[in-house]
Image: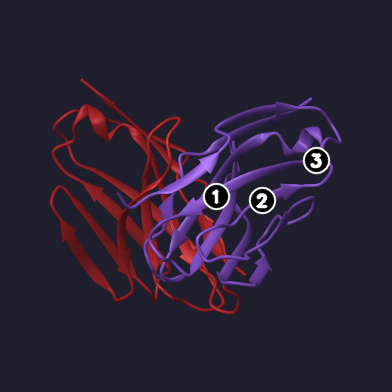
Chain colours: A red, B purple
Amino acid sequence: GQNIDQPTEMTATEGAIVQINCTYQTSGFNGLFWYQQHAGEAPTFLSYNVLDGLEEKGRFSSFLSRSKGYSYLLLKELQMKDSASYLCAVPDNYGQNFVFGPGTRLSVLP
Amino acid sequence: EAQVTQNPRYLITVTGKKLTVTCSQNMNHEYMSWYRQDPGLGLRQIYYSMNVEVTDKGDVPEGYKVSRKEKRNFPLILESPSPNQTSLYFCASSTGRTSEQYFGPGTRLTVT
């Protein structure tokens, strides 16, 4: 099975850079997803990493280290609209189900 | 417009009264899931379906049923709801379990 851990809350300032970490333990590995969820809304896809390294997509980047069971989401030039929860998730290798971490609630302050 | 729809969006009901939450997607996706989201617990998968007539349990299936008679629809059935099923429910679809999931807008259920 899976065990996924993320910090519960983070605070950062508008214009700054923030790194949200995710550690996971899986019996197999089929990639790692990051989703963004604004309060009261549905999650939306941000990134998918299956190979080690950094993938950049505009202001957002995601990093994966499979040997360390570790990923992070890097948000640059923070904006107020980035205040949201960020969810790390992995598909189960042996089943077909999908496991989400507890999520990190990010507050961006002016 | 590609989307996942859920109905109803809000529902208040009483213990033991059977209910169904509908989910429909127009993207011809094979994989569909139901999740519940509770404070401090995050999103937990209830049931998923790999294709028509193929469903399986997620992490928290007790008290729920699903069916997948058509590719586009994946209803969630609570035969005898209880207060511990009060939660925010999301339906999602994707082309596969290693693909981006598209989520519906959510259904907020309260069982009294």
**Do the residues marked 1 and 2 share a common chain?**
yes
Q: CA distance from mark 1 to mark 2?
A: 8 Å
Q: Is residue A44 above or below residue B11?
A: below
Q: What amino acid type is highlighted by mark number 3?
A: Lys
**Do the residues marked 3 and 1 share a common chain?**
yes
Question: Element at badge 2?
Answer: strand
Query: Are there few (<14), some (14-19), or many (20+) residues within 10 Å of tag 1?
Result: many
Which quarter of the figure has residue B41? Answer: top right
Q: Quadrant of the N terminus of chain A?
A: bottom right
- The foreground one among A54 and B77 is B77
> From the viewer's perspective, is B56 left or right of B34?
right
Residue at image x 18%, y 28%? A14
**Do the residues marked 2 and 3 share a common chain?**
yes
Residue at image x 41%, y 45%? A43
Are the residues tagged 1 and 2 within 8 Å (C-beta)?
Answer: yes
Residue B18's disc number: 3
Mark 2 belongs to which subunit? B
Measuring from the top left, give residue A87's x and y in whole percent: 42, 49
Measuring from the top left, give residue B85's x and y in whole percent: 73, 39
The residue where tag 1 is placed is B23
> From the viewer's perspective, is B85 left or right of A34?
right
Mark 1 belongs to which subunit? B
The residue where tag 2 is placed is B76
Mark 3 belongs to which subunit? B
Question: Element at badge 1?
Answer: strand
Measuring from the top left, give residue A106's x and y in whole percent: 35, 35
